[in-house]
Amino acid sequence: MAHSVLRKQIGLKKRIDEFLDQVSEASLLFKQGVSFYIEEKHDQFEEKLKQISTVEHHGDEMRRAIERQLYLKTLIPESRGDVLQLLEQLDTLLDCCKEVLWQFQIELPEVPFKSHDDMQELVSYSVESVEAIVRSARAFFRSSDVSDHLHKVSYWESESDKVTTRMLMDIYRRDDLSLCHKSQLKDLVRQVAQIADRAEDVADRLTIYVIKRML
């Protein structure tokens, strides 16, 4: 399976590790960027936008290079397919972090002061989900136990759901916000929460790969 395919390909494993670094870095830049936006630190926010765009571009290049190497040097199509699908799903997390941060820049949403802490908490849980799936993927490629890391992905996604529900209920019960403003905030909250949802989707797929590896 995937672990036996990569065992002797040190260069490939190193490239995959570097790609996972990019996914992790994108999530951290996203967290910092949202914090700067809420604190109205515009210059710092725009710097994080530039950085996350660069990281996303590098991540795409790394993924394509890994795919080429897999097609050229990997002999077992079944294992190659598992690795390719996992990398593509991880890449969607990187893209999602960049896209949501750009959503702040494009829409310039006014996040009510009362919602600042909840937004920071939601972002934190989404980022924890990404970090947990990155650790899970590293463990998978190193033939280590991934169960503890996968459990944490689900845990943080569940925490994200709780904050999302609380925020949406609070937003729609406020009398000082227009319906348009409420709708914009709802979409923003759901987009941030979607990062954790996608991390859980990757975890579900990785669970299948782990089972296949054991057969």
Image (spheres, rainbow, N blue to C red):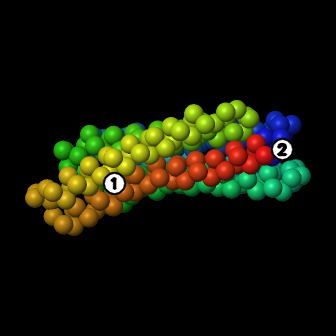
Residue 71 location (% of width, % of height): 83, 56
User: Which residue sits furthest left?
Assistant: 175
Specify few, some or many for label 1: CA neighbours under 10 Å numbering under 14, 14-19, or 20 or more.
many
Residue located 51% across and 53% down the image = 198
Of the pair 109 and 125, the residue shown nearer to us: 125
Secondary element at image label 1: helix
Q: State whether residue 16 appears in this view.
A: yes
Going by the image, does 126 lie left or right of 88?
A: left
* Distance (Cα) linking label 2 and label 1: 40 Å
Of the pair 115 and 49, the residue shown nearer to us: 115
Q: State whether residue 25 appears in this view.
A: no
Specify few, some or many for label 2: CA neighbours under 10 Å numbering under 14, 14-19, or 20 or more.
some
Residue 106 position (above or below residue 8): below
Residue under numbered circle 2: 5
Amino acid residing under circle 2: Val
Label for residue 166?
Answer: none
Secondary element at image label 2: helix
Residue 204 location (% of width, % of height): 58, 51
Residue under numbered circle 1: 189
Residue located 33% across and 40% down the image = 121
Residue located 41% across and 41% down the image = 125
